[in-house]
Amino acid sequence: MNYVEWLRVRNCLKWLAIVLGALLVIGLIIRITVAVQMGNDESFVKHTMTEPGTKISHSVVGGINRTTILNPREHVTITIDDQPDGGRVIRVVEPSGSHREHADHVTIGSFSATHSQNGTTETTIIDTDAPVPFAYYLAMAGLVGLIVATIFGATFARENDGHLEIALLKPVSRVRYAFGVIGADVTCIILAEAMTIVALAIGQAMFEVPHFDFSGANATFVLVALLHPFAWYALLNAATASLKRGAGAIVGFSWPVALAIVIFSHVNLGNSVTGETFHAIFWTLSRVIPASYASVEFGHDDSVSTGLAAGPWADSAQYAMLAALALVYGALAVVQWRRVEA
Amino acid sequence: MSTISIKNLRKTYGPYIAIDDFSIEIPQGCVYGLLGPNGAGKTTTFKCALGLARQSAGIVLYDGAPLVPETLEHIAYVPERSVLYDWMTVAEHIEMQRRAYRKFSVSRANELLLQFGVDARKRVRALSKGMRTATMVALAIARESDVLILDEPTSGLDPINQRHVLNLIINESARGATVLFSSHQIGQVERAAERIAVIDRGRLALEGAVDDLKADRKIVEGIFPSESFTLNGLASDPRITRIDRNGRIVRALTSHDAQDVLARLEALGATGLRIVDLNLEDIFVYAVAPSEATADVVEAAQS
Amino acid sequence: MPVVLTVDPRSGVPIYLQVIEQIKRSVALGVLAAGEQLPTVKQLALDLTINPNTVSKAYRELERDGVIETAPGRGSFVRSNGVSETTKAAATDVARDAIAAAVREAKSIGLSADEIRSLASAAINRWFREDA
C-alpha cells in the first residue's frame, strides 16, 4: 500500500551507501598512505633518537613486538608494544619533579591515556586501540539519523503537492496510509543508523581491530540515538503536514531555529528583566524541541553521561520526553493530514 | 458499486461558492457526461465525490451508501492533470497500483501503454503531457472497476489517441461499468454519453438524456410580414425557453413540442416557418451563454 | 457481417434514430440481406464510436418495427420471413420521411399546396420517365 514510500526509502539508503562507501574509500586511501609513510617504527620516535645516549632495542614479549627506548640521562623509559589487533600501547615512565599521588584518565574515541603518579615516578600509558565507548558510534549514527529524519521531514507535504489523487484514493483509511508512511520512514532512519555504525566499524577496522565499551550509558544512549531523530522527524512533519508548498523552506529553516532556541535556553542572558524574560522564553520554547533532551557529555571517566543530572532516573526522564514528543508530534501530523483537501 | 447519486452538493471555499445545490443521478452502466465552462465546478464535483475534498453540504452515494475506503476498491479515477510521481518509472506506477488494489490487470495495463505508445521503462518526468494522460488512463482502465470517473481524459492527446480513449470509454460501458466523465470536446460527449449534465457557475443548468435533449430542444423560426407584431404572451408558454426577435424574424427556443409552438407562431401570422435541429454543442452554448448562441445557431442552420 | 453505417453525432438528429434509419435503408437497398446477422451491440458501438446503450435502443426499436429479430445468446438478425414486406415497409418509411421533409421545407419557403403538388408531379414524371 505504501510502495511509493518504500521506493523513497530505498533511494535514500542507496545514496547513503554511496556516500558511506566513498568515505570508506577515502579512508582506505588514507590508510594506505599512512602505512606507506610509516613503513618502520623509527619515524615515530625519531626525535628521541637524536638525544645522545638513547638506546633503542627490540624484543618480543609474549608474542608482541616491543620497542624499548631508554634515555638514561633523563631516566625516561618508553616502551611501544605493537598489538596484533593493530593498536599500540605506549608506556612512558619518567621521574617527576614533585612528590604526590594521583591518577588521571582520558578517552577520546579509541585513544585512551592514563596518567598516574606514584611518589616521584610519572607513568603515562597510551592505548591507541582502547575499547571505544559505543556512545561515539551512536552519536555519529544519531547524526545520520537526524539527517535522514530531515530528508523525510516533509513526507506528507510531498504527497500534498499534486499526488493526493493517487495517495488518497487507495482503498484504506487515511490514518492507516499515514501510519504506513511513518513506518517506512522510521525504518529508513533505523537502517541508516545501522549502516553508519557498520561503516564506522569497517573504517576503524582498516586501522585497527575495533573494541567496544558497551557499559553503562553507552548501551542506553542508543535510545537517544533513535528517539531524537524520531522526535525530530515527527516535529518537522507536524509543522508541514498541511502544506502543499513551502514545506522545503520550513524544513530548511527548522534546524538553525531549533538550534538557536536550544543554545539560548542554556546561555545566561544577564540578570536584567529583559535578559531574564528572554531566557524564560527561550527555555520554555526549548521544552518542545527534541534536541533539548538529547545532549551528551563525554566525561573524563570512561563512561558517557547524558545531559541532565546524573543518575538513571534523569536519563529515563530524557528518553520518556523524547518518546512523548515523537508520539505527540506524530499524532499532530497524522491528524492534520487526515483533513487535507486535494 | 455502480450507481452514483449526488444530492444537493454544496462546496464553498471561504466566501466563494464553488458548487451550489448540485444534484444528479447516474444509473448503472450509464455513460454520463458532465459539461461546463472552465471553472464551472466540474473538477470540484469530482473531488467531493471521491472524498478528496470535503463538501460543505449534500451527500454523494454509491449504490445508496456513502463513500468509505472499501468503496475506492471499485472506483478508478483519471484526474485532469498529471498526478504521477515524476521520479518513478511507468512500470513502478503499475506495480504500485497492483499492490494497492485487489483487482488490477498488469497485462491490460501494458497492452494499453503499448497502444498509446508509452514506454513503461521511462521515468514520468521524461514523458510529454499527453503521454502522462495516456498513462493515467491506462492505469485506470486496467483496474476493470465498476465505476470510472474521468476529468478531461483527452487533454493533451493527439486526435488518434483521443479517439482511442473514447473507444476505451465505450468498451468500459459495454463491459457494464458506470462512466462519469467531463470533457470540453462536445463531439466526444455527444458520441459516448447517454446522459449529460451541464454545470455553470456551480449550479446545474441542464440535465437529461442526450437523445431526448436533441429530440426536444429545437428552434422554431418564423418570419412576420412586418416589424410590428405582437407575440400575444408567447413568451409565457412553458415550452419556450427564450425568444429572440431580430427585425421580422422570430426564433423561439423550445424545450419540447416544437410542432405545437410552430403552430402557435403560424396562428400569429408568421410564415417561412421551420424547425431547426440543435446539436449538443448548440444546446450546451444555449444553456450557459445564451447571448453567444443566437447568431451561431442560425448561421449553422443556414449553411 | 461488416455493416457500413455512418452517423453524424453533430447533427441535431439523435444518434439512435440515425442508426435505425440507416439500417432500414440498408435493408431496403438489399445491402443487408434477409437472415443476415447484424454486428453485436458492442461491436457496432466501437465501430461507430458511439454509446452501446444507444445501439441497444436502436436495435430494440428495429425489433419492435419488425425489421430485425434478436435471438438471446445468438445475436440480432434481419428478419427472413416476409422479407419483401419488411423491405418494402423499410423503404416506405425512408421515403415517407424524405417526402415529408421536402414538403415542410417547400411550405416554409412559402409555396402553396398546389404549387408543391405540381412540383411533385414534375419530379415523378422526370424520374419515372427515365425508367420506361
Image (cartoon, coloured by chain):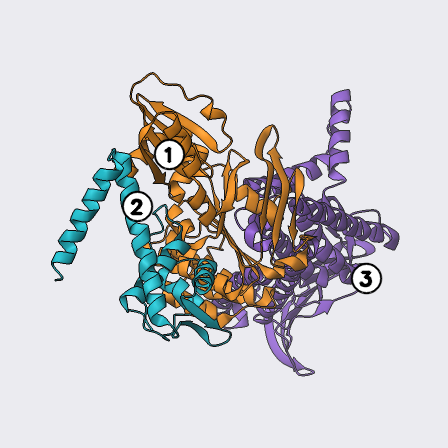
Q: Colour of chain A?
A: purple
Q: Which chain wears cyan?
A: C
Label 3 residue SS: loop
Name the residue at 42% across, 38% down.
B258
The C terminus of chain C sits in image quarter: bottom left
The x, y position of residue A218, in whole percent, is: 76, 61
Residue that carries the numbered disc 1 in the rendered image: B220
The single residue placed furthest to the top in the displayed view is: B228
Residue type pointed to by label 1: Val
Colour applied to chain B:
orange
The residue indicated by pointer 2 is: C101
Which quadrant holds residue A95? bottom right
Residue B297 placement (x, y as % from top left): 33, 35
Residue lying at 64% horizontally and 76% vertically, measured from the top left: A85
Query: Which numbered disc, 1 or 2, marks the residue closer to the eye?
Result: 2
Q: Quadrant of residue A117?
A: bottom right
Q: Label 3 vs label 2: CA separation?
A: 102 Å
Q: Is residue A50 above or below residue A260?
A: below
Q: Which amino acid is tagged 2?
A: Ala
Residue C98 shown left or right of residue A127 in the figure: left
* Whole-number angstrom distance, CA of label 1 to CA of label 3: 96 Å
Secondary structure of the residue carrying tag 1 is: strand
Q: Is residue A51 visible?
A: no
User: Which residue is painted at 31% across and 61% down in the image?
Assistant: C91
Q: Crowdedness of circle 2 by 10 Å Cα count: few (<14), some, many (20+)?
A: few
Disc 1 residue crowd, few under 14, some 14–19, many 20+, Cα 10 Å: many
